[in-house]
Amino acid sequence: MIDLRSDTATRPTAGMRAAIAAAEVGDEQRREDPAVNALQERVAELLGQEAALFLPTATMANQIALRLHSRPGDVLIAERHAHVVIYEYGGPAVHAGLMIEAIEGRAGRFGVEELDAVTTPSTKSADQRATILALENTHNSSGGRCWPLAELRAITAAARERGLATHLDGARVLNAAVATGVEPSEIGALFDTVTLCLSKGLGCPLGALLAGPRAAIESAWREKHLFGGAMRQAGIVAAAGIYALDHHVERLADDHARARRLGEGWHAAGLPVDLEQVETNFVQLDVSALGLEGDEALALLREAGVGLSSTIHPTVLRAVTHLDVGDEDVEQAVERVSSALASRVAA
Ligand SMILES: Cc1ncc(COP(=O)(O)O)c(C=O)c1O
């Protein structure tokens, strides 16, 4: 099967496995693992922050960030379909006691007026305390869409003026940086804390980092332990992260070009793809225009040997390019999907 379900499908390359095998390791909980320490320093610099903490997953990084910025009963402001709102199993409520003020975005984005609408105090003395603004870049549920730097500047400045802490779920922030031609540090430095995931486009087997000011990252070490995320010879995995930063960042542009080729191929075959929405490594296919349910379409495509996945929008399917998808896979996927759905296009 040509697996376009997610960029989490990647398996470590031979080069990455060699880096893993050669990793110098130590006890991470004692801060004695050289590979972990090196990765943390590298990522802090990459994201324009003072320090970073290595964690098993991006979900844990997001959840720890929320705890750092809030007290129970506070309000988290985020886009309605953000990962932290819909895919983290109610984590903001469970781990940080947060209520969520969800803003309906456009391509995962919203503006200062919308922020104002949910932060302007009413005359009631019992107003809830909005304390955090969490943004996502790229925004997964809208199809890997990017925030333009100017918009990020405006909204993070407005948040700061209103006394909000800012967190970036930058699980795919390197895709955003490559696609918009901006240094990752320019994006990262706008926020108080930033999550980066290693196990998506970067191709590592697992791992994520939370970057931020030194004092916040010190507190995050404690949170990591509380979450059961403190590890031992984790340099085995951190070495993969260092390898990925050396070898797999610039090549994200290849994933983006392949997503575009896929979108163009399907569009040329009459399939419902909005090419304007293809900004990074995701292509969205709204099969309602073909008179199909999402599950029905997924089954048809699976039979044709191509794996796509569902999204929170019931009839919108998603294809994601990644390290394990080459040009030939893309050509095959253009052909197979176009012919599997051809009768629907004509209908
Ligand atoms: C935007 C975003 N944030 C966070 C995560 C969570 O990543 P992990 O699976 O490493 O917890 C994902 C995973 O898909 C994601 O897309």
Image: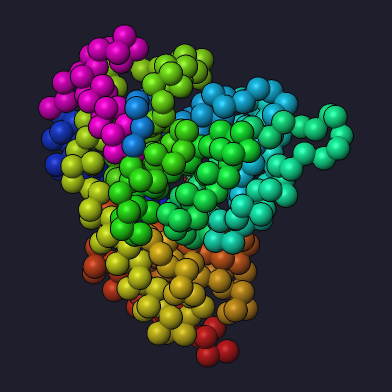
**Which is the main secondary structure of the residues drawn in magenta?**
helix
Q: Residue furthest top?
A: 30
Instruction: Compare residues 175 and 158 and report the one nearer the observer.
Output: 158
The quarter of the image holding the C terminus is bottom right
Percent across and percent down for residue 118 are 72, 45
- Please determine whether, in this image, residue 162 is positioned above or below residue 311: above
Q: How many marks?
A: 0
Question: Where residue 131 appears, x then y in whole percent?
Answer: 64, 32
Q: Of 325 and 295, which appears nearest the observer?
A: 325
Instruction: Establish if 223 lies above or below 279.
Output: above
What residue range appears in magenta?
22-47
Find residue 5 and report its image quarter. Answer: bottom left
Q: Residue at x 56, y 38 (%)?
A: 160
Residue 340, by quadrant, is: bottom left
Q: Nearer the viewer, residue 180 or 316?
A: 180
Q: Position of residue 239 (x, y in %)?
A: 21, 30
Q: Is residue 41 magenta?
A: yes
Q: Does residue 84 appear anywhere in the picture?
A: no
In the depicted structure, whether residue 306 falls above or below residue 219: below
**Left or right of 26, for residue 341:** right
Inspect the magenta stretch and tell me whether residue 252 lies in it. no
